[in-house]
Image: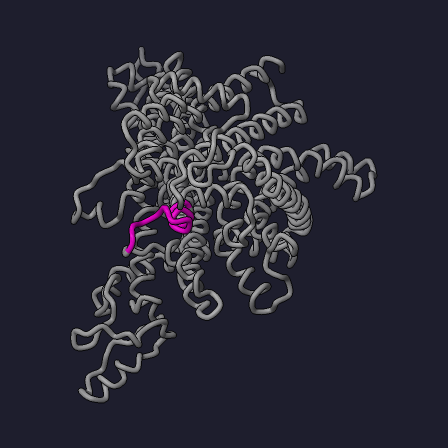
C-alpha cells in the first residue's frame, strides 16, 4: 500500500513539474516582453526593469526562480491590473470552490440516487425516463445549458435574479455545472448497481432473509459506489473546465472568469498562475481519489 | 468386395473390420440434419446484424447521414456565403439585420416587388452583421464535424502506433513508454489546450490565403494538442489488447515461420482488436466536437469570419434577450451531432465488443 502511495505521489510531483515547465516555457515562447508595449523606454531603463524582474538571466535560471517563488505562493503581479495574483487567486478561488463543491455534492448525491433507482426498477418506466434524460444530458454542453437556464429563469420568467455580489443565488450555476457529471454518475451507478445486484453475496443475503432495504444499502450499494470514486478525478476536471464558461455566463467573479478574462486580455502572468493553480488542484484530487479507491476496495491488489 | 462395400481385409492391414460392428445406414431424415440450413456468419456480419436491429443506432446513422448531406448540398443551393453581407444590386442592405426565420428585409421586399424576381429566403434569418444565418450554421457544422473527425483520426493513428509498439515490445520498452503515457494522462488536457491555443496563436505564422489560414491558428493548435495529448487513452487500450492477443498460439505460429513483427502486428494482432479501436474512435468524435465548441465559445476557436457552432452560440449571447433563436439553432445542432455519435458509439459497442457477447 505504502509503495503504491509513494509511487503515485512521485508521479503527481513529476506531473506538476512538467505542467510548470510547459506553462513557463510556452509563455516565454510568445514574442515580445512585458515592457515592449509601453511607451518607448530608454535601453537603460529597460535593462534596469529586466534586472529587477530577473529577465536578464538565462531562461532556465528564470524558470528555477519562478518555481521557487511558486512554492512560496508568490505568482507575481498581473500584467494588466498590477495587482498581486496570489491574492486574486485566493479570493476568486473561494467563490469557485464553493460553487464547484456544491455542484460536486449535488452531482454525486443525485447521480447515485437516480442510478440506484434505475437499476432497481430496471426496464420499468422510471428507469426508462432516467436513461433517456441522462443520455440527453451527456450531449448538452455546459455553456448551452447555462445560457438557456439564464434565459429562461432569469430573463423570461424572472424567478431568480441575475447574479450580483448582493443577490447571489448560486442555484443556476450549480445546476449547469452538475448536470453533465450527474448524468455520468447516474449511468455509472446504474451499471455497477446492476452488477452488484447480480452477485452471489446479494443472493445469499436475500436467501438469509435480510430485509430488502438492508440488502440494497448494505450489500449492493456499498459495492456499487466503488467505481463512482474513480470518477471523482475526471469530475473535478469537468467541473473546473465547466466553470470557465459557466462563471462567465453568470458573471461570477470566480477563478474561471479570471482565467477567461486573462485569455481575452492576453494577461500572460495571470494565465500562467491560474493554469498552474488549477492543474495542481486537479492532480492533487486525482491522487487522493486514486488512493481512496485502493483503500476502500480490498479486492484490488497493489502492484 | 464383400457386402457394405468394404474392401476385403489384407492380412497385414490394421484396418478395423467394420462388418463385426452393428452399423445402420442413416435414414434420409437423419441425413438432412447434416445439411447447412443457413449461411455461416462472420464476426463482422453478425455485428452488423445486431447493429441493424438497434433502432437508436440506426436512427443516429440516418441523422448523421442527413446532416452530412445537408452540409454538403446546402452551400450549393443557398446563394449566400458564410461571410457575405446581404446586398441588393451591389449595395449593402442595412435593413437585413437580425431578421427572423423566413423573413425578408424591407429592401428585399421592395426589390422583389420591383423586379418580380424571387430571392432565396433566409431559412434561419440573419445575424447582427446582416449575414444569412442558415449558411453560417451549415458552415459551423462543417467546421465542428471536420474537427471531430480529423482529431479522431489523429488520435487513432498515433494511439494505435504507440500502443502496438509498446504492447508488442513488452518489457522495459513497454514500462518506459507507459510511464510517459501515465504522465500525459494526468495532465489537465483542457487547461493545456487553452494554454497552447494562446501561445500557438501568437507564435504560429501561416501564409494567408491557404485553407489553414481560413481556419485560423487556434484550429491548428487544437489539432496539435489532440496529436500531443488525446492519443494516450487509445494507446493504453491498444496496448492492453495487444498484451493479451500476443499470447495466442497463432502469433507463435506466425513467429515460428519467420514473420516480421510489423507483419504480425498488422495482419494478426490489429484485426483482432479492430472492433475496440473503432468503438473508441466513434466515441472520440463527440468529445472532440465538445472540446472545439467549448474553445470557440471562450473565443479560442476558429478565426472570424469562419463560424463554428461554439462561436455562433457565443455571439448569440449578446442579443440573447431579443433573439434567442440565434442560440437555439447552433446549440441544437451540437446536441444533435453529439447525441447521434454517442448513441452510435454505444450501439457499435453493443454489437461489436466481444466482451459483451454471450
Residue B243 colored in magenta in the image: no
Image spot of residue B101 (x, y percent): 37, 74
x, y percent for residue A99: 62, 45
- In the depicted structure, whether residue B92 falls above or below residue A6: below
Residue at point 22%, 84% (across, down):
B111
Relative placement, left or right, of A211 versus A94 is right
| Percent position of residue B133, x then y | 33, 66
For this view, does B275 lie left or right of residue A86? left
| Residue at point 41%, 62% (across, down) | B316
Residue B1 shows in the view: no
**What residue is at 51 percent from the left and 54 percent from the top?**
A249
Q: Which residues are magenta?
A: B291-304
Which is more toward the observer, B41 or A179?
A179
The reply, left or right, for residue A101 in relation to residue B354 is: right
The one nearer the camera, B132 or A129, is B132
Q: Quadrant of residue B248?
A: top left
Q: Is residue B303 magenta?
A: yes
Nearer to me, B99 or B79: B99
- Callout count: 0
- For image coordinates 30% across by 40% down, the residue present is B201
Amino acid at each position: 500500500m505504502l509503495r503504491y502511495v509513494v509511487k503515485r505521489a512521485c508521479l503527481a510531483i513529476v506531473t506538476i513539474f512538467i505542467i510548470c515547465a510547459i506553462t513557463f516555457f510556452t509563455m516565454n515562447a510568445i514574442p515580445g516582453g512585458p515592457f515592449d508595449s509601453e511607451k518607448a523606454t530608454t535601453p537603460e531603463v529597460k535593462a534596469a526593469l529586466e534586472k529587477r524582474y530577473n529577465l536578464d538571466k538565462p531562461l532556465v535560471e528564470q524558470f528555477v526562480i519562478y518555481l521557487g517563488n511558486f512554492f512560496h505562493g508568490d505568482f507575481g503581479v498581473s500584467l494588466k491590473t498590477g495587482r498581486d495574483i496570489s491574492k486574486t487567486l485566493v479570493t476568486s478561488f473561494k467563490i469557485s470552490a464553493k460553487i464547484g463543491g456544491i455542484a460536486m455534492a449535488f452531482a454525486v448525491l443525485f447521480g447515485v440516487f437516480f442510478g440506484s433507482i434505475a437499476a432497481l426498477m430496471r426496464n420499468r418506466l422510471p428507469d426508462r425516463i432516467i436513461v433517456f434524460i441522462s443520455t440527453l444530458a451527456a450531449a448538452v454542453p455546459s455553456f448551452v445549458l447555462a445560457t438557456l437556464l439564464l434565459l429562461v429563469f432569469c430573463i423570461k420568467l424572472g424567478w431568480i435574479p441575475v447574479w450580483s455580489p448582493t443577490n447571489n443565488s448560486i442555484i443556476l450555476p450549480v445546476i449547469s455545472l452538475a448536470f453533465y457529471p450527474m448524468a455520468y454518475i447516474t449511468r455509472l451507478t446504474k451499471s455497477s448497481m446492476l452488477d452488484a445486484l447480480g452477485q452471489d453475496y446479494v443472493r445469499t443475503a436475500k436467501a438469509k432473509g435480510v430485509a430488502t432495504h438492508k440488502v440494497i444499502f448494505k450489500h449492493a450499494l456499498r459495492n456499487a459506489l466503488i467505481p463512482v470514486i474513480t470518477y471523482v478525478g475526471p469530475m473535478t476536471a469537468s467541473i473546473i473546465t465547466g466553470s470557465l464558461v459557466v462563471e462567465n455566463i453568470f458573471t461570477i467573479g470566480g477563478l474561471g472568469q479570471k482565467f477567461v478574462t486573462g485569455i481575452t486580455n492576453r494577461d500572460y502572468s495571470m494565465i500562467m498562475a491560474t493554469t498552474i493553480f488549477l492543474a495542481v488542484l486537479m492532480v492533487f484530487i486525482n491522487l487522493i481519489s486514486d488512493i481512496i479507491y485502493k483503500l476502500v476496495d480490498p479486492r484490488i491488489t497493489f502492484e | 468386395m464383400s457386402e457394405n462395400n468394404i474392401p476385403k481385409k489384407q492380412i497385414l492391414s490394421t484396418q478395423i473390420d467394420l462388418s463385426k460392428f452393428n452399423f445402420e445406414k442413416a435414414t434420409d431424415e437423419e441425413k438432412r440434419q447434416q445439411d447447412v440450413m443457413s449461411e455461416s456468419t462472420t464476426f463482422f456480419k453478425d455485428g452488423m446484424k445486431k447493429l441493424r436491429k438497434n433502432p437508436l443506432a440506426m436512427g443516429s446513422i440516418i441523422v448523421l447521414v442527413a446532416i452530412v448531406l445537408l452540409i454538403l448540398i446546402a452551400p450549393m443551393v443557398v446563394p449566400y456565403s458564410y461571410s457575405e453581407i446581404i446586398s441588393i444590386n451591389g449595395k449593402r442592405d442595412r435593413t437585413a439585420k437580425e431578421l427572423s426565420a423566413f423573413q425578408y428585409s424591407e429592401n428585399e421586399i421592395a426589390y422583389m416587388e420591383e423586379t418580380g424576381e424571387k430571392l432565396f429566403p433566409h431559412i434561419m434569418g440573419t445575424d447582427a452583421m446582416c449575414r444569412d444565418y442558415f449558411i453560417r450554421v451549415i458552415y459551423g457544422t462543417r467546421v465542428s464535424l471536420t474537427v471531430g473527425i480529423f482529431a479522431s483520426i489523429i488520435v487513432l493513428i498515433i494511439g494505435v502506433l504507440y500502443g502496438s509498439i509498446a504492447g508488442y515490445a513488452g518489457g522495459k520498452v513497454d514500462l518506459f513508454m507507459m510511464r510517459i503515457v501515465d504522465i500525459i494522462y494526468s495532465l489537465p488536457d483542457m487547461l493545456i489546450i487553452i494554454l497552447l491555443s494562446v501561445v500557438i496563436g501568437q507564435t504560429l505564422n501561416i501564409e494567408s490565403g491557404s485553407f489553414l489560414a481560413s481556419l485560423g491558428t487556434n484550429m491548428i493548435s487544437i489539432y496539435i494538442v489532440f496529436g500531443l495529448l488525446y492519443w494516450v487513452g487509445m494507446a493504453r487500450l491498444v496496448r492492453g489488447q495487444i498484451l493479451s492477443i500476443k499470447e495466442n498460439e497463432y502469433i507463435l505460429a506466425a513467429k515460428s515461420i519467420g514473420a516480421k513483427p510489423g507483419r504480425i502486428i498488422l495482419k494478426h494482432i490489429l484485426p483482432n482488436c479492430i472492433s475496440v479501436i473503432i468503438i473508441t474512435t466513434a466515441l472520440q468524435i463527440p468529445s472532440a466536437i465538445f472540446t472545439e465548441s467549448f474553445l470557440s465559445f471562450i473565443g479560442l476557436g476558429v478565426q472570424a469570419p469562419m463560424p463554428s457552432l461554439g462561436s455562433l452560440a457565443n455571439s448569440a449571447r449578446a442579443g440573447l434577450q431579443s433573439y434567442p433563436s440565434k442560440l437555439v439553432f447552433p446549440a441544437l445542432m451540437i446536441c444533435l451531432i453529439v447525441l447521434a455519435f454517442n448513441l452510435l458509439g454505444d450501439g457499435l459497442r453493443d454489437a461489436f465488443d466481444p466482451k459483451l457477447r454471450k
